[in-house]
Image (cartoon, grey):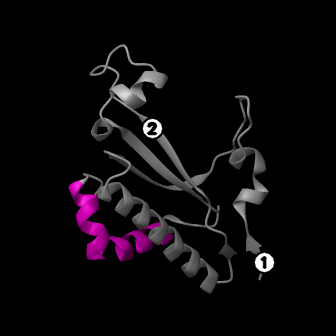
Amino acid sequence: MEKLDLTKKYKAYFTAKTQPEIVDIEKASFIALRGKGDPSGEVFAKTIEAMYSTAYTIKFACKAKGKDFVVSKLEGQWWFDATRFTGQTMNSAAVEVPRSEWEYRLLIRMPDFVTAEHMEAAKSTVTGQKEYREPLISNGIL
């Protein structure tokens, strides 16, 4: 069985250059979670653990059916409420905006053959585990 590696297949998507550039990215599926809070906090760490647990639950379900893949790299998008913290730039925000006010979206790209049913089954499995459920609920993710 051949293992799909999205990082190798979509190098332009996963490779950063030293200079910004516009890259056309085709439609893709992701596991994604949104949250708010300090990235050095316990809730954020549990969020990442839950993301990877979900991704690997999906991976092993697909592998059992003959479609294996490498779990992709975690991606993060960060922002803050610009109306509350007016006048902040991307350079100053990291110091001036309290980390508890940082908002984020975490993503892990999934292969095209991963279905909504795979996602729901994995989500149910992972959120049924107390160590993930409580921090995700307290962060407003579930």
99 or 128: nearer the viewer? 99
Residue at mark 1: 2
Where is residue 125? Give x, y as percent. 37, 77
Report the span colored magenta: 117-138
Report the amino acid beneath label 1: Glu
Nearer-N-terminus badge (2/1):
1
Where is residue 94? Give x, y as percent. 41, 31
Q: Quadrant of residue 44?
A: bottom left
Residue at mark 2: 78
Tell me which secondary structure the magenta stretch mostly adopts: helix
Report the amino acid beneath label 2: Trp
Where is residue 86? Give x, y as percent. 33, 16
Above or below 93: residue 136: below
Residue at the image position 78 percent from the left and 57 percent from the top: 9
142 or 104: nearer the viewer? 104
Where is residue 81? Give x, y as percent. 32, 27
Count neighbours of disc 1 (C-alpha within 10 A) and say few if under 14, some if 14 to 19, many if 20 or more. few
The verdict on residue 129 being magenta is yes
